[in-house]
Image (cartoon, coloured by chain):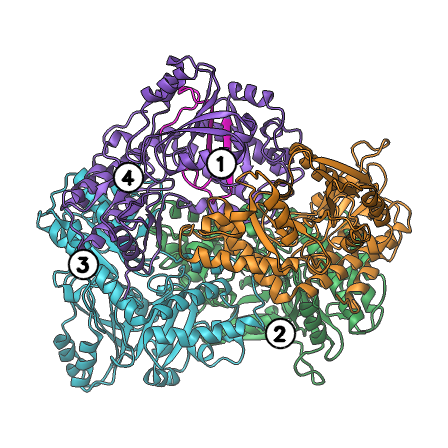
Chain colours: A cyan, B purple, C orange, D green
Amino acid sequence: MSLAHGRPYLAIPGPSVMPDAVLQAMHQPAPNIYEGDIVTLVEGIVPDLKRVAKTDGEAAIYICNGHGAWEAALSNLFQPGDRVLIPATGRFAHGWADMAVGLGIVPQIVDFGTKSTIDADRIEEVLRADTERQIKAVMFSHVDTATSIRNDPRALRAALDAADHPALLMADCIASMACDEFHMDAWGVDVAITGSQKGLMVPPGLSFVFFNDRAKEFRAANPRVSRYWDWVPRTEPEAVYQYFGGTSPTHHLFGLRAALDMLHEEGMERVWARHATLARAIWAACERWAEGGAMVMNVSDPALRSHAVTALGLGIGNGQKLRIWTAENAGLTLGIGLGMSTEDDPDGTGFFRIGHMGHLNAHMVLGAVGVIEAGLQALQIPHGHGALEKAAEVVAQPGAVAF
Amino acid sequence: MSLAHGRPYLAIPGPSVMPDAVLQAMHQPAPNIYEGDIVTLVEGIVPDLKRVAKTDGEAAIYICNGHGAWEAALSNLFQPGDRVLIPATGRFAHGWADMAVGLGIVPQIVDFGTKSTIDADRIEEVLRADTERQIKAVMFSHVDTATSIRNDPRALRAALDAADHPALLMADCIASMACDEFHMDAWGVDVAITGSQKGLMVPPGLSFVFFNDRAKEFRAANPRVSRYWDWVPRTEPEAVYQYFGGTSPTHHLFGLRAALDMLHEEGMERVWARHATLARAIWAACERWAEGGAMVMNVSDPALRSHAVTALGLGIGNGQKLRIWTAENAGLTLGIGLGMSTEDDPDGTGFFRIGHMGHLNAHMVLGAVGVIEAGLQALQIPHGHGALEKAAEVVAQPGAVAF
Amino acid sequence: MSLAHGRPYLAIPGPSVMPDAVLQAMHQPAPNIYEGDIVTLVEGIVPDLKRVAKTDGEAAIYICNGHGAWEAALSNLFQPGDRVLIPATGRFAHGWADMAVGLGIVPQIVDFGTKSTIDADRIEEVLRADTERQIKAVMFSHVDTATSIRNDPRALRAALDAADHPALLMADCIASMACDEFHMDAWGVDVAITGSQKGLMVPPGLSFVFFNDRAKEFRAANPRVSRYWDWVPRTEPEAVYQYFGGTSPTHHLFGLRAALDMLHEEGMERVWARHATLARAIWAACERWAEGGAMVMNVSDPALRSHAVTALGLGIGNGQKLRIWTAENAGLTLGIGLGMSTEDDPDGTGFFRIGHMGHLNAHMVLGAVGVIEAGLQALQIPHGHGALEKAAEVVAQPGAVAF
Amino acid sequence: MSLAHGRPYLAIPGPSVMPDAVLQAMHQPAPNIYEGDIVTLVEGIVPDLKRVAKTDGEAAIYICNGHGAWEAALSNLFQPGDRVLIPATGRFAHGWADMAVGLGIVPQIVDFGTKSTIDADRIEEVLRADTERQIKAVMFSHVDTATSIRNDPRALRAALDAADHPALLMADCIASMACDEFHMDAWGVDVAITGSQKGLMVPPGLSFVFFNDRAKEFRAANPRVSRYWDWVPRTEPEAVYQYFGGTSPTHHLFGLRAALDMLHEEGMERVWARHATLARAIWAACERWAEGGAMVMNVSDPALRSHAVTALGLGIGNGQKLRIWTAENAGLTLGIGLGMSTEDDPDGTGFFRIGHMGHLNAHMVLGAVGVIEAGLQALQIPHGHGALEKAAEVVAQPGAVAF
């Protein structure tokens, strides 16, 4: 007998659980892509995307995954030989750096390990030291999906301002957008990128680059931008196909329309507060479990934790065992540890991640912690008691979360 | 802010949560209903339905809800003036009795209240007293959806045998089929009925009457049976439309095919064991909560509880408050108390039910108890501690459940 | 190679082609059936159904197919021994008569064959001859799905009035509702029934009985009505389950809501005009083909033809051959001949039907006639020329159709 | 009244009509993208894609539209400054050339206008003249979606061979793959690209680059390839995400799996034969219409016409009028003329295109020509007679089509 025969719950850090309304909206015949409703559809989506990123700048939509959006942003802004500064707090900053290398751009990585946030003072120093202003941009992950560290864009903006450095501030918000509070314009971010499959609750396949006037200047100065990545026709289109550099991603647009409607009906502030509260519920459980010794949240300071994903350690082999147990016995799929391998644990079997992003409510979260509790019990992994009641307590008394 | 914005979980005692594969199978164009695939489809469904009911008898499919199936069974077997014996343990026995009245059949109700199972000895006495054998059938609810009492068909069969009474034994398995262990033939049940929308995991709209050779004799002796309810052409059809007394319920058949595939792939014994274990997980939580005073499970003896639904009391007003809280704050819809009103609580606001039937896994159940815990905390309804860990413990160590 | 690999078109006389919006609306999780949105949903559907039937009377919704609706209407109105007059113009009047027999009602059939409409004068005579007013109702098919004859309710109303006979006028509109013009109140029809799967464009599984105050009097005088069929609680419900005599047909309601929205957005008059015009397009082709000798439309007078289905003869064996050819080679499924067997052609292989009901546009119809033309050519069945251009001509110049 | 209220038929040259099975397969929850079924899914798709292109080479899958696939192929093979030869027979060759320019590649266009196929002798001359072998590739559209000209890859291969030129032969098969006969390996094509939304019958959003060992040599010699477009990890992946350079396009993969199953169940040769035959049916109608003077097929030689799309002229204004009429009155959406503007008709209002690709059967095609006939009649555009019967004749007697 398995207790997994029911609606499976995928609690990995993306793709997130899609609302039924999104999948339903995608289940329809192809539309005309030359004229008619498609035009209205796209023209309505763009401003609603910008409301998600809290920007009055531009939003370019790309048919690609998050890696593609990384390349898109880089392709518009830089030329081979340009230098960018990348403060790293986990795997994905290195990924973006590698993407830059692929374009001939020279990344300068300042690595803050996998457990700490970016030290903005250190970045300020590096910027000050760049007296020739060769650094074209500071590129960082708002949230690193692997480590679950959340960095503060405001601190980096302050560092840039303090150093009086003209570099662009570029945020990878793939794992954070529509989960963690983010105000692109107010926080001084020049370029932000994200994908469809996390906070935006749409299947993977669309990604987005938001940019402001300063970024436009960089683009304007760029002698050559590949046609697919060029954001100019995508944001100043004369015909609908130009939004997408070719054929429109019709069914993703149907789904995105439904998702944006849901987000804005709820309100971005309430979306963020929901994620913050549900993250706190998970952490409340994890803290109790951690008292038993085996479990460690990767990020010790709650203020530095993502509200969309939590990375955990459980002792060599245990992370993997737990993931297998919850999937086979209870219908819960947890995320693998990513970029967490150590010398003792080269395959990272001691780690796992809980995705808690997007279309997410208290039932899903309390079910996930309940199943993890059962798994810890079943596998006799040492853990503290009272975790579930603590999680429920957060749901019961969420308190005010102001943004 | 609400924490309900996620995939809602409907934990009412039917309709149950439909598997994605069922809804997906129903999303297709209409088929030809005169010839072709529809014939194979129906001919494959009938034997697989009988495997669910564990019978070698007949299975008639009706386009109707459970109330219709009640009327169908009665219409085939009895004439106006016939007498039937109905031991009642909740609302639905009375409902079936009322259906009989509507057909001119005379029900004799023996009421066992809303908290106890049928006393088979008492029924045996009544049968023995019926020396003229006027009682044509003993009709009972295997599980009463309102009270969540589960009756034992074997005890009633024993009572009939002990009294050497020729009445038919008829089981309403609407809330129990494919949730609670049931062996129609082995347990001596002559007629069993159920619907599509609970353990069978298909939207409401189809119902089923299973019957054996003894029941066929009653039908044969019946001078007139209405065409719509007549089970003869439905079980001895010459053309496909006769299975349904007219146009086939095409899309429900698509869904039913998918659901039967899932059930038989899992195996009926494992389906029952899963329900039994998940019910025990819920009860483990309820028992702890009950220690705090306010919560009472309607059925005190676990051996008499349904594995598909649990009825609970929480104090006047509290049942309703809890239901509203979980729906608005956490995405969990609980069932209303049904047939539970008292003099002090004429609207039954003190009661609620947890549906735990069908496409159900540990994540869904542990999420439900987690949300109820949060609701009890938020509403400051007195309750004992440690409920969630106890529920998780059952999931962690389900033990062997043999059928 | 087959030319059938594309979107298949099912041109049988029901179930009709479902709009994508209907199937899409049905693809969602089960709702709460006790309270909430379901109440609003049902309360909105009832008046919109009545707008389809053009009545201010009542609309009872049943979970059943059309045969069930026949039985529902009869069960409310009549008792065993009651007499009803049934003018027959095809198979389904006999079916309804048989349904009456199953309830102990005595049908008096006046058969007008399979090629002519009802002779209202003849009915008037029969009614006049019923001096003791034993005939309780005149029951007829507005359209017979088998013969495709369309009868005129106004002529029967006039016959009843002329004979000053108090019998109810009851119309079976299963094949005609939302296809052929129908004004229940204005045309003096007391009871009308229909199903979900034809003009209403929803999968089979729901049916409807419309009735007026005179019918209510019959119901009120009826000493016993079976609970499932009793329309009183269904039209005067105190709780939502009473609309359906038990569990709500949740997913059919979702689909029906979408379909009613489409119908009323188009407007009933325009829906009728569309059906009338597309039927004329088909007939225009058939008339040309008929010039070649083999093809005969079953109903020679266009004024007596259904706008929803056309029955045709093609010579022994040829109907069946054509149906097989179009399905296997071109993706078009035509309806079998029904009730058309003759001594020479006991299996009715010479006949077929074109369904042209519901979600139907010019492309679908012109494609169907194009495929039939190809089939006639391929099978070398004699046929006249110019059929397709004639059909296109009707589409090109539909003219005004006033209702 | 409009006769368009039915299932709309989108006859534009892509996106094509999606099979119900494809949309159904896409309607499911997100899968785990790190492990499990996704791995099997992708590993099964790659060889089945290659069977479509008839190659034993490699298949790289990209999340992008066709324009992206153009850029992908170019990015892998060439460096800034490289020269490519582009024989043009319509808009899309110029588009690919523009894409090359965006990457710093230097296209040498030999323009054959919009009504003729490529003159391979002329290309051979150009290649011979390139004594320094600076031309790295000959890039052409197998079918130009705008002009509907179909070029012969074999002729270009012969030209390369005759000139003993080492340039790669690269085919844009976006509009032709799985519609028109194509044997990548046997015909000596080194690189072929296509998209998901035409012959492959999946929504836009995935594209594919097929390449052989010679192309691999070019890639190996390329000092820098952007990470997103680099086909090496996509075709030699160590982890599933590398197939897609990041997050997998989960729902498109579900749809693609269903589409590939349908294609290979039918068989590529039969798929091509079906397209060829249905194209002939359309042309047969067009030839008759053309006799009336107004209509002209853009490509006069049937041997040079695409089997997936047909471009037509109808006189200034008439193309647009016809498209509007068919959409508003009959449920048929025709494609706009593309790249067809003339001095007299700067907006190309005299042109339109019929898409006849992918999930396409005789009913759809005969319906389309029927509607066009009706439109020509309604708009009083001069046209010859007998068109529809001629189209039906092709369907009736398709003859043998051997590949």
Q: Main secondary structure of the magenta part?
A: loop
Q: Nearer the viewer, residue A344 or B328?
A: B328
- Please state the extent of the stretch shown in magenta in the rendering: B181-210
Which quarter shows the N terminus of chain D? bottom right
Left or right relative to B192: residue C52: right
Residue type at mark 1? Met
Q: Is there a contact, CB below 8 Å, between mark 4 and mark 3? A: no
Q: Identify the residue at image location x=56%, y=49%.
A: C61
**A124 above or below D235?**
below
Residue type at mark 3? Val
Query: For mark 2, does the 10 Å Cα neighbourhood hold few (<14), some (14 to 19), or many (20 or more) residues?
Result: some
- The residue beneath circle 3 is A394
Mark in the foreground, 4 or 1: 1
Query: Residue D60 appears in which quarter of the rendering?
Result: bottom left
Residue D378: image location, x then y, percent: 78, 71
Q: Chain of mark 2?
A: D
Left or right relative to C222: residue C84: right
Res A329 label: 4
**D389 above or below C127?**
below
Residue A12: image location, x then y, percent: 29, 54
Query: For mark 1, does the 10 Å Cα neighbourhood hold few (<14), some (14 to 19), or many (20 or more) residues?
Result: many
- The residue beneath circle 2 is D110
Of the residues under marks 4 and 3, which one precedes in the sequence?
4
Query: For mark 4, does the 10 Å Cα neighbourhood hold few (<14), some (14 to 19), or many (20 or more) residues?
Result: many
Q: CA distance from mark 1 to mark 2?
A: 84 Å
Q: Secondary structure at mark 4?
A: helix
